[in-house]
Image (spheres, rainbow, N blue to C red):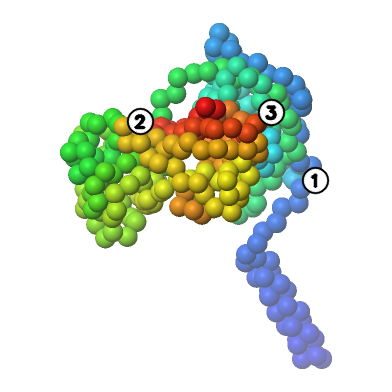
Amino acid sequence: MNKKLFFPTFLAALFLVAGCEKAEFSPNPTLKVLARPTITSPASESSVVLTENTANDPFVVTWTAADFGYRAAATYSVEIDRVGNDFKDAVILGTSTGLTLNSTIAKLNTALFSTLALPGETVSNVEMRLSVKVSPEVDVIHSDAITLKVTPYTIVIIYPQLQVPGSYQGWNPADNTTVIFSAKSDNKYEGYIYFKDADSKYKYTVGPSWTTNYGDNGANGTLEAGGADIALGAAGVYRLNANLNDLTHSNLRTDWGLIGSSTPDGWNSDQNMTFDPVANKFTITLNLVAGKIKFRANDDWGVNMGDDQANKTLEYGGADIDIPADGNYTIDLILSGAVYTYNIKKN
């Protein structure tokens, strides 16, 4: 009789242990979300006018708690981005483990004017949302976005920069005209530099001295402190990228052109621009018809720029630029700073 009871009991215990082990080692933990957070202040569609006189005033964001069915230790981040950008370039205004973020007008203005490159003294539409993180093993959840009409004020921005000394400029790390910038102050640098000679070499330095410098020992895209000179090929304007977070870098020689429905060949091929090394810009003069244009590198859509805000600043993959009327135009492309710009002049 004991034998008849032993085997069912043993099998039940075995299945129970197997089931527990499967639950314990589940590779994809899930979290039940009963309610997402909601931003309660500022109100959606409200207007926020920022001024230098109110820079030190508080800017407060409040929200309701996310409900996970138990008392979860959640971290809330307030994100801001341009309307319609789906938070692809979201700026984090701040984080909180409570239901309030106490920021300032100055911090909000920096996020809007410096990082998102919104025009000063001009009304722009932005979206704000919350991202909620409970643990590294659980996906972040988001609140619904609210829309705000914001007017930032103009400030002088000093972007972090990385010096680029090399054979093309006398190996001078103190030359402040040969630098690249971190537009988001995130240790990721980019810039366009003209190398007048073929087979130029360069390195990166942090500050105007050789104290902290980086090169590439294996010519493999990895930076090493005190590493070997980085070699280029043909002379020309190169886009340089350096990431000091993971110590990687890249360079790309670029020739720029104009393309679009306004140009003589429409969207089929580029109208080549000429680089002016004295003015440090690409330029072209040609007849255009009313329509649209964009800037494109190397006759390919891999690197192209447009203007999302119609404010004369450029973004990669940005919106088409309007040409309002037929005529002869001179167009300049300026890639010498942290923010890329252009000029359109009807002759």
Q: Which residue lies under the disc numbered 3?
A: 125
Q: Nearer the viewer, mark 1 or mark 2?
A: 2
Circle number at residue 211: none
Q: Residues within 10 Å of mark 2 (few under 14, many from 20)?
A: few
* Quadrant where the image shows the N terminus: bottom right
- The label number, if any, that marks residue 279 in the structure image: 2
Which of the 4 image quarters holds residue 175?
A: top left
Q: CA distance from mark 3 to mark 1?
A: 31 Å
Please, which residue is most extreme toward the left here? 170
Judged by depth in the image, the label closer to the viewer, 3 or 1, is 3
Q: Position of residue 32 (x, y in %)?
A: 76, 51
**Which amino acid, mark 2?**
Ala
Q: Image quadrant of residue 106?
A: top right
Amino acid carrying label 1: it is Leu
Q: Which residue is disc 1 drawn over? A: 34
The answer, for residue 161, to whether it is visible in the render is no
